[in-house]
Image (tube, grey):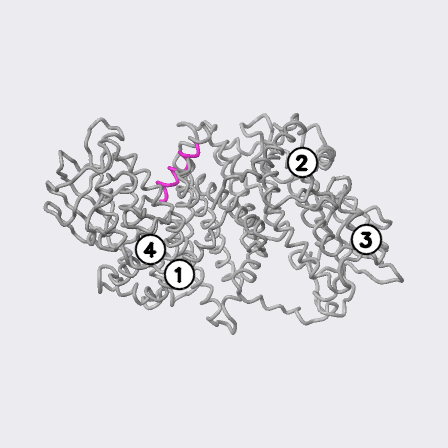
């Protein structure tokens, strides 16, 4: 049990700190530090543009995707070194948002199932941010039930012809490549007829339409495929093995989402430390303290849970299932914290103007965005099912569609 | 960074689990619950023989001299097994106070006896309702004699000696409080056993009437020592709580797999699954906070006060959450005396209060975080 850096770790930290100090876009620091949710919006800059610039600089310095091996654009760093880097990168880590899906999910899937040629061609550019990847899994009829997806891939010579629709695709509008799961055989039960591909998002027949979200923003998209041609060489894994391939992606998704989870707690602590109420600072109020303390131990619990996972990684063990709790805890925390922060402001809590409130409207934005954190990447309910079934060993739900050919399953709704 | 127990420490945990599963089955806990004995004397002796009572006591004072990380792993097992022995009062409170503030002679007198299972010790702090604070201490010391009443005193009815917090000044400051060591078998000490929600860990009222006492630590430094003892005990007790929470979760899981209703195991219903998933979440968060507390405790880190409060809050919440929902998953059977669920429910709610209640530690955590931020 040891929290101190080893001499090597300390040296690595010093090197990272020095490099960041010399290279980070300091003009963005203040604005980034105020932005508490995963999805960043900057006043005078496009997040993709400044993100790409930072990622490129990092790649040139050997700091991008640093846990990947050098030949694929990384640094060959240890899991602990990656964590040290993230700690040192601090608020600038928020600039990596456009690349997180690629780095956390698509990259590892290509790494596991791609050919050597593919890995050398695609991974370094993914790592350096030159090419952005998105993940095309969810569909109108396949959200939590992602294996119920209907986008068809039909073999035609050495190619596959894709027709169908994906939805909730983050960053599809600025992505260069996409990881796409399709149905190649509707005559077998749903999990068995799937196949994974990657494709150029500029391919003919790909149409990206932004979705206007409940919070007024547009970060997700619908993606339509009309007779899109994908060469068979861009298939990842065997035909019909797409479900297993997707599990690799989703496992990495939960790990990567867990790594930089926003809980809203640091912002809330700071807010309560400076908010004047009728009879003093909010943080001196016993009721406020009680709420803060409960959130504090959730935030620290998540942090140390990820440290435990990293420790087992660094020993060459597979991390335990503990990390699966991250998003489940953080999503609700964000929503509860936003609601309570606004409650402390009274009627003015409803105002969203940046200059109106001490907190620059950040909790109002958090409130409006937080519902998505409890849905994206697995709803709270799906995550609880996963914990119950895979961690605690409880029986799976009775699946009425389990042994039924996919094309015999009734459908409705979206 | 290595945020895990070592292989040797894990091995010790396995040994403790094996020992307790043999020597402390639920039947043994029930014997104390049903009032057949005040505590399990055979188990206490066995723990001494295994070296568990003195695991963190230095070798020169009769202990194993292993350390506090080792004590943490044993504490977790004690909590899992609901061991009906005065472990927390003797080892986390009395022994820690002696190791922090005792003179060489005091350590030589009591620590080897603790390690050998020959002396039960406790901390006499509370005087009726209220959380730890110098203000609630009314018991006075003049010279070497104490006058006043302490309650509740954990394991007070079976303790051989107590560390007693007494008022030695009237300035209204922390420096008014000093600590004393009292041989409870001596004169001027009257002990009354009190009933409490968890009879497997007794509580008592102790009335001191010109009781002979010797100072523990310097006059006026009592509150500082108590604060340190409480922080250290908070981490250790948090491990007991996590052990209890894990066991309650396992019991609920096992029952959900076994119990059939509507033609299927109740653990296949999402309503039941989600209860158990949430129990797992709270137990996992608590365990991680405890590991941080263990690190801070074992290294005497400056972060200990904050880490201890976080471990205490998180583990208290987790044990209460898991114990009550274990009953819920069991349904009606969980509310019978025959099933063990209520023993965990009792222990969870009793340990939630013993070192100061949840609200006390919540308040302490925020204070400590603010101090850190200001620094």
Q: Nearer the viewer, mark 1 or mark 3?
A: 1
Callout 3: chain: A
Q: Which image quarter: residue A283?
A: top left
Task: Label 4: state its secondary structure.
Answer: loop
**Residue identified by numbered label 3:** A225
* Label 4 sits on residue: B52
Q: Are marks 2 and 1 on the same chain?
A: no
Identify the residue position indicated by label 2 in the image: A95
Name the residue tied to disc 1: B15
Relative depth, front residue between A247 and B337: A247
Q: Are marks 2 and 3 on the same chain?
A: yes
Q: Nearer the viewer, mark 4 or mark 3?
A: 4
Quarter of the rendering occupied by the C terminus of chain A: bottom right
N-terminal label among 2 and 3: 2
Q: Are marks 4 and 3 in contact (CB under 8 Å)?
A: no
Q: Residues within 10 Å of mark 3 (few under 14, many from 20)?
A: many
Task: Give the residue furthest to the front.
Answer: B60
Tell me, yes or no, whether dots 4 and 1 are on the same chain: yes
Q: Where residue B106 appears, x then y in whole percent?
A: 22, 42
Segment colored magenta:
B358-370
Is residue A48 among the parts visible in the rendering? no
Name the residue: 26% across, 58% down: B199
């Amino acid at each position: 049990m040891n929290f101190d850096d080893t001499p090597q770790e300390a040296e690595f930290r010093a090197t990272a700190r020095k490099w960041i100090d010399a290279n980070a876009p300091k003009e963005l620091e203040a604005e980034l530090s105020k932005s508490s949710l995963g999805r960043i919006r900057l006043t005078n800059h496009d997040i993709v543009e400044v993100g790409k610039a930072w990622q490129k600089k990092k790649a040139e310095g050997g700091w991008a995707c640093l846990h990947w091996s050098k030949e694929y654009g990384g640094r060959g760093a240890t899991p602990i070194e990656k964590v040290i880097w993230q700690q040192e990168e601090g608020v600038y880590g928020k600039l990596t948002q456009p690349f997180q899906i690629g780095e956390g999910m698509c990259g590892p899937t290509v790494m596991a199932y791609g050919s050597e040629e593919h890995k050398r061609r695609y991974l370094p550019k993914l790592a350096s941010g030159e090419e952005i990847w998105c993940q095309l899994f969810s569909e109108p009829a396949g959200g939590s039930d992602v294996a119920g997806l209907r986008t068809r891939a039909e073999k035609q010579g050495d190619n596959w012809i894709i027709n169908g629709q994906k939805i909730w695709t983050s960053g599809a509008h600025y992505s260069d490549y996409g990881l796409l799961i399709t149905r190649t055989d509707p005559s077998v039960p749903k999990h068995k007829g799937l196949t994974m591909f990657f494709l150029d998002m500029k391919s003919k027949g790909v149409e990206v339409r932004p979705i206007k979200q409940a919070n007024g923003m547009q970060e997700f998209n619908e993606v339509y495929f009309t007779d899109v041609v994908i060469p068979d060489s861009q298939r990842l894994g065997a035909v019909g093995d797409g479900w297993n391939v997707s599990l690799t992606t989703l496992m990495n998704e939960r790990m990567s989402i867990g790594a930089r989870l926003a809980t809203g707690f640091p912002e809330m602590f700071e807010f309560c430390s400076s908010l004047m109420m009728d009879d003093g600072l909010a943080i001196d109020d016993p009721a406020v303290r009680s709420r803060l303390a409960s959130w504090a131990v959730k935030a620290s619990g998540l942090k140390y849970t990820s440290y435990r996972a990293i420790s087992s990684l660094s020993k060459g063990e597979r991390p335990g299932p503990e990390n699966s709790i991250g998003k489940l805890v953080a999503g609700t925390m964000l929503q509860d914290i936003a609601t309570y922060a606004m409650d402390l402001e009274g009627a003015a809590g409803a105002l969203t103007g940046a200059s109106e409130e001490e907190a620059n409207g950040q909790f109002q934005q958090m409130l409006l965005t937080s519902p998505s954190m409890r849905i994206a990447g697995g709803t709270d309910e799906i995550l609880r099912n996963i914990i119950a079934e895979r961690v605690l060993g409880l029986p799976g739900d009775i699946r009425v569609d389990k042994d039924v050919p996919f094309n015999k399953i009734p459908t409705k709704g979206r | 960074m290595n945020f895990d127990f070592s292989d040797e420490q894990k091995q010790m945990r396995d040994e403790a689990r094996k020992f307790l599963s043999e020597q402390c089955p639920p039947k043994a806990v029930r014997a104390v619950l049903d009032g057949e004995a005040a505590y399990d004397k055979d188990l206490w002796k066995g723990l001494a023989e295994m070296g568990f009572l003195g695991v963190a006591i230095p070798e020169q004072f009769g202990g194993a001299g292993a350390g506090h990380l080792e004590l943490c792993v044993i504490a977790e097992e004690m909590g899992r097994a609901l061991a009906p022995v005065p472990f927390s009062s003797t080892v986390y409170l009395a022994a820690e106070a002696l190791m922090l503030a005792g003179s060489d002679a005091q350590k030589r007198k009591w620590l080897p006896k603790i390690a050998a299972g020959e002396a039960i010790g406790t901390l006499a702090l509370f005087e009726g309702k209220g959380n730890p604070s110098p203000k609630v201490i009314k018991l006075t010391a003049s010279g070497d004699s104490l006058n006043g009443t302490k309650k509740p005193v954990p394991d007070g009815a079976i303790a051989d000696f107590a560390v007693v917090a007494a008022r030695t000044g009237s300035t209204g400051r922390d420096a008014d409080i000093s600590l004393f060591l009292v041989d409870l078998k001596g004169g001027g000490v009257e002990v009354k056993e009190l009933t409490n929600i968890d009879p497997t860990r007794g509580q008592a009222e102790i009335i001191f009437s010109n009781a002979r006492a010797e100072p523990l630590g310097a006059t006026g430094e009592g509150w500082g020592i108590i604060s340190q003892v409480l922080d250290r005990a908070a981490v250790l007790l948090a491990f007991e709580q996590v052990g209890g929470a894990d066991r309650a979760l396992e019991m609920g899981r096992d029952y959900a797999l076994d119990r059939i209703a509507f033609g299927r195991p109740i653990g296949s219903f999402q309503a039941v699954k989600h209860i158990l998933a949430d129990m797992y979440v709270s137990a996992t968060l608590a365990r991680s906070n405890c590991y941080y507390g263990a690190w801070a405790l074992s290294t005497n880190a400056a972060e200990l006060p904050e880490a201890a409060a976080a471990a205490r809050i998180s583990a208290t919440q987790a044990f209460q959450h898991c114990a009550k929902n274990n009953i819920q998953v069991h349904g009606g059977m969980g509310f019978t005396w025959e099933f063990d669920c209520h023993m965990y429910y009792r222990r969870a709610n009793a340990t939630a209060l013993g070192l100061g209640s949840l609200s006390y530690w919540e308040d302490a955590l925020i204070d400590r975080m603010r101090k850190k931020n200001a620094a």
